[in-house]
Amino acid sequence: MKQKILDAIIKYETIIIHRHIRPDPDAYGSQGGLAEIIKASFPEKNVYSVGKEETSLHFLRRLDAIDDSVYKNALVIVCDTANQDRVCDKRYTTGDKLIKIDHHPNDDAYGDIYWVETSASSTSEMIYEFYLFGKEQGLKINDEAARLLYAGIVGDTGRFLFPSTTEKTFSYAGDLINHPFSRTDIYNQLYELEPNIIKLSGYVLQNFVMLDSGVAYMVLKNDILEQFEATASQASMLVSNLGNIKGVKVWVFFIEEGENEIRVRFRSKGPIINVIAKKYNGGGHPLASGASITNWDAVPSIIKDLENICKN
């Protein structure tokens, strides 16, 4: 698959790279890192990174605004996006050829070519592996690509703490830090929080619900978000907070976003939770998944499902 992807990149003059909605550092890192590798390797090509920008990740990359006509005869690559419903910018289907590069379970095998490695810590790790594969065939990596890929790996491994971190992950990260960028700046920009979000974090720790089954959950409705002047995206950053609590097996955040959507963020210390996420039109990794629901009536059912997987 890596050779097929490289052959396609070599063939096409215009390459447009997408990623998922509500991007995280790995989405930006893999998308931007791949774009920079292609630009460094083939400076004559037209390479674009597209999608709705996430303000909190402006420090990583700013994205391109392109006309629909650019997609004609273009190669489109979608990074870090398991399902087509979650691809940001629906024009991704209007190019000449479509490639999927991802590390989530391949439940939606879209694209003319797809390379999926569920054992990879992140899609950014996969992009660096792609560079290593192709460097004898002309691929080059620049400092900006290294910075982006390192940030993506750090983000999706929780600073190398998550079980997805492997010996390969550390090896690749060790290669990347040989490039001249500031790891301290990356950590500060990824993990520093505004004072209002710190206060919201305190609210979460005072008001979460812990059940005897090992399930913990937190409900954040619009009135609470407004009280702390927080967005749903900012609140989602706090989901890891409950992971340090003794006795917790799985936990979930329900975060209201506007009037018609509730974000559901699942995390686990062992029980497989992406099967629950899929049940509610979501998906993700076995220990970190997400879904969306349209009303609060589904909340008791989700909690019951999580209790069942803990008991079993």
Image (tube, helix red, strand yellow):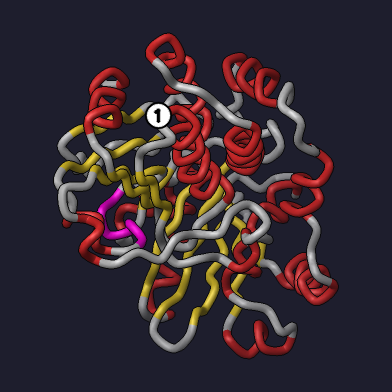
Residue at 25% across, 55% down = 92
Q: Is residue 227 magenta?
A: no
In the rendered structure, the answer to whether residue 137 lies left or right of residue 8 reads right
Q: Nearer the viewer, residue 272 or 121?
A: 121
Question: Residue 309: image x %, image y %?
Answer: 44, 45
Position above or below: 120 against 149: above
Tell which residue pokes out farthest to the front in this image: 44
Residue at 49% across, 48% down = 27
Query: Which residue is denoted by mark 1 in the rendering?
Result: 118
Where residue 66 sits, quadrant-wise, is: bottom left
Residue 312 in view in this figure: no
Q: Given the image, on which type of amino acid does mark 1 rest? A: Thr
Position above or below: 14 against 145: below
Q: Nearer the viewer, residue 112 or 145?
A: 145
Tell me the magenta residue range. 83-88
Where residue 193 sits, quadrant-wise, is: bottom right
In the rendered structure, the answer to whether residue 145 lies left or right of residue 179 reads left
On-image quarter of the C terminus: top left
The secondary structure type at the circle numbered 1 is loop
